[in-house]
Image (tube, grey):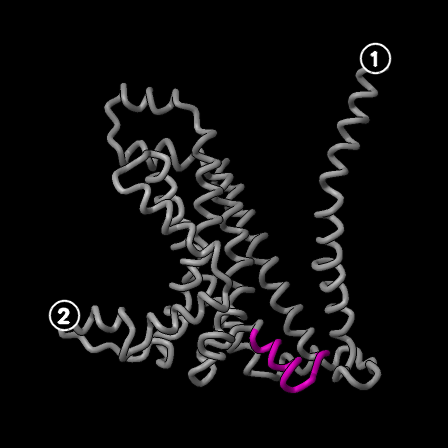
Amino acid sequence: MKTRTRYSKLDALTAWSFLTPALVLFILFIVIPTVAGIVLSFFSWNFFNEPKFVGLNNFAKLFDDPSAWSSLGVTMEFIVLGVVPTTIIGFMLAVLISANMPAVGVIRVLYFIPVVLSVAVSGVLWVFLYDPRQGPIAAAFRAFGIQIPNLLQTQSTAVPALVVMMVWLALPIVIILYLAALQRVPDDIYAAAALDGAGAWRTLWSMTWPNVLPTTLIVAVLQVINFASSSLDVSLIMTNGGPLNASRSLGLYSYQEAFTHQDVGYASVLSVLQLVVIVAIVVVGRVVTSRSSK
């Protein structure tokens, strides 16, 4: 009994020794900035003067600011257009990789490329790809006699163009998560499906997909956070929120309020709104998923 207790304490100590560095970083870079942002939303501050408590004035300004709600709409557009394709494409590519299909080596190389590139480098690369004069995408359309506009400078196509690039950036982590989930699917169900005469598609959607649903929930939550937050980096680099603020997300609007207009308090309110939206979407998704699984 003493030996078991000693080993359990040693296991706990070992676990905490691995968890502590990540926990410290999480507190320093996630928890503390989040709490500080919530606190600053009740103050007026321009980085230089002493913060002045203004109560709910910043929140009142939010409800009278049409730019905030249009930016929220853009953020929701990023989420709606990005999460589902990323999840489905990531799942399908993971299935192809795990099944060792032809040309799987090429897929493995291509899906890992975004991992080694920074968002800034990726942004510059995709700006070139979308270039209407010299970019390969426009050149491919011209080969079929189709002239396309500047996708990043057209209001109706700016957000979808950015979403395509963000899906490309997000796929590596999604594929890795699904590959791990596919390795845990028991082989017995595939043997049973083969005995019942199930085809490849039937096996995929009736056997494989239900067994990776827990991972799908994790992927969906991560991608909601990703497309809500990474839209700041991508739109800032590639379009700066244009044209006519068509791709200005809530995160980018908050950034502009803080560093262009030096209104840190109102920028914090915008960040709080983004946090509330993300949490609400995650909670609703969790409730829907738990009910559908019963």
Q: Residue at x 47, y 82 (%)?
A: 245
With respect to residue 247, does 92 lie above or below? above
The majority secondary structure of the magenta stretch comes to: helix
Report, in whole angstroms, how far the alpha carbon at label 2 lies from the one at label 1: 77 Å
Q: Magenta includes 259?
A: yes
Label 1 SS: loop
Residue under pointer 1: 1
Q: Nearer the viewer, residue 71 or 167?
A: 167
At x 43%, y 24%, the residue is 186
Coordinates of residue 5 in the picture (x, y in percent): 83, 20
Left or right: 66, with 164 as reference point = right
The magenta span reads 252-265
Residue drawn at x 32%, y 76% as measured from the top left: 131
Can residue 291 be found in the magenta stretch? no
- Residue 9 appears in which quarter of the rendering? top right
Question: Marks 2 and 1: which is nearer the front?
Answer: 2
Residue 132 % position (x, y): 28, 78
Tell which circle, 2 or 1, labels the residue nearer the N-terminal end. 1
Kindly identify the residue that appears in the image at 76 percent across and 82 percent down: 47
Residue type, numbered disc 1: Met
Quadrant of the image containing the N terminus: top right
Residue 278, above or below 249: above
Q: Which residue is mark 2?
A: 144
* Residue 223 as seen in the image, left or right of residue 127: right
**At label 2, which amino acid type do we have?**
Phe
